[in-house]
Amino acid sequence: MHHLELPALHADDPLGFLAALGILELTTATLTAKPRLHWNGPAGPAVLTTNQPLTLDTLTDLLTTHLPPKPTPTAGQPNNTTDTDDQDDENTSTAGTKDESWDPFPHARGLLTRTREDTTAPNEALRLRVDTAHHTLRELAQAERETADRQARWFASLTNVMCFEDHTPKTGKNDPEPAEGSKPTTVRRTPVTPLIASAGQMTITGLAQKAVLGCHNDPRQIRSALDGWRRVPDYASANFDHRSLGDAHTNSEGKPYQRGAPGPTWLALHALATFRLTATSRTQAATSWDTTNRRGALRWPAWTPPLTSTAVTVLLEHPAVRATEPATNHHTAMLTNLGVTALYTAPRTGLKQSNGPLAASRHLWP
């Protein structure tokens, strides 16, 4: 077996952790033998284990094969991939194109280009009516059994079919007024994964499109994700990275600003299938998502045994990894036997009118 260290992806960094899982997801889909992932020390870099020798250059080439081609701008639209919106504004996903059919996620082709159910649906097309979500999952699961298609696994990781949110459609100025004494129609829709923060009109599709365009705009982004991130002005890192959001007092113009890294963000989006969605009553949860505080927090381990993508999910869901008091003798013994070297958490921050990026990690154990 061959081991390749990924110097820029550290176990104690939420975006680095997610980007490493994204690499494991993409290489698992590409290589004939399943790759494995571990960490070189509690806060050390990720190490990818494969049955064939890889270098940072050849791994970059392999990952780049999953990058979809850049969309063709519509006539009259500039071919501009720089986006200057803040996190509370609409995420203009194609940044200079109007090609809504462009699929930024061929790893699960067609999933992120679904059309909204109806005009009353929210901006996020994956927030479906509960009955529609159940029907869709059954269809995708049948297709997965027949053709090994990935969409069922990804759909269940992005859309939580086990709980719902009450959604009251907004009415336009030309819509008829409800009858006197009647209540506005409430629709029960599925939430999306809590690992994606809800901010403004941000959508998962828009985040993926912007990350892809950022990688096209700077061809060194994917390589730099492995050995030293290249930050881009006015790029928001999908709320995975607190360092991409700059405070107003650090800017000469006195305004908040974004300076994210599209390469690791694009890889991190491919990690979302690792985290299975669950629910308790109407409260949704997910693998590695801590719901003990109001906004939630990402919680994850570093480990030394090289693990496949399936084994990683099993480890993330282990009771000792998810324990609220991991430092007890019982949990410490289990964590040590599992090869876990550290536990970290990164709480979700809050912006003025929405959820914000994951904060800096905090060391939980040992």
Image: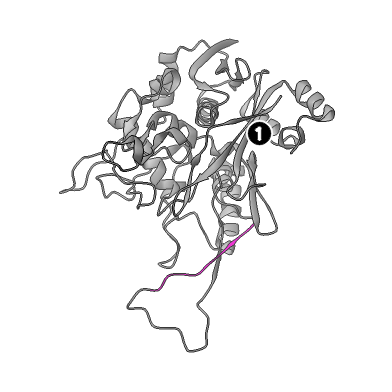
Q: Quadrant of residue 178?
A: bottom left
Image quadrant for the C terminus?
Answer: top right
Task: Tell whether position 170 is magenta.
Answer: yes
Residue type of the residue flagged with mark 1: Thr
In the image, taking residue 151 as reference, residue 90 lies left or right, namely left
Q: Percent position (x, y) of residue 101?
A: 34, 49
Residue occupying the point 43% across, 17% down: 227
Residue that carries the numbered disc 1 in the rendered image: 313
Q: Percent position (x, y) of residue 272?
A: 54, 39
Q: Residue furthest left?
A: 76
Prevalent SS, magenta region: loop
What is the crowding at mark 1: few (fewer than 14 residues within 10 Å), some, or many (at least 20)? Answer: some
The span picked out in magenta is: 163-171
User: Does the rendering let one see residue 68?
Assistant: no
| Along the viewing direction, whichever of 72 and 340 lies nearer the viewer | 340
| Along the viewing direction, whichever of 310 and 21 lies nearer the viewer | 21
In terms of secondary structure, where does tag 1 sit? helix
Q: Percent position (x, y) of residue 237?
A: 41, 37
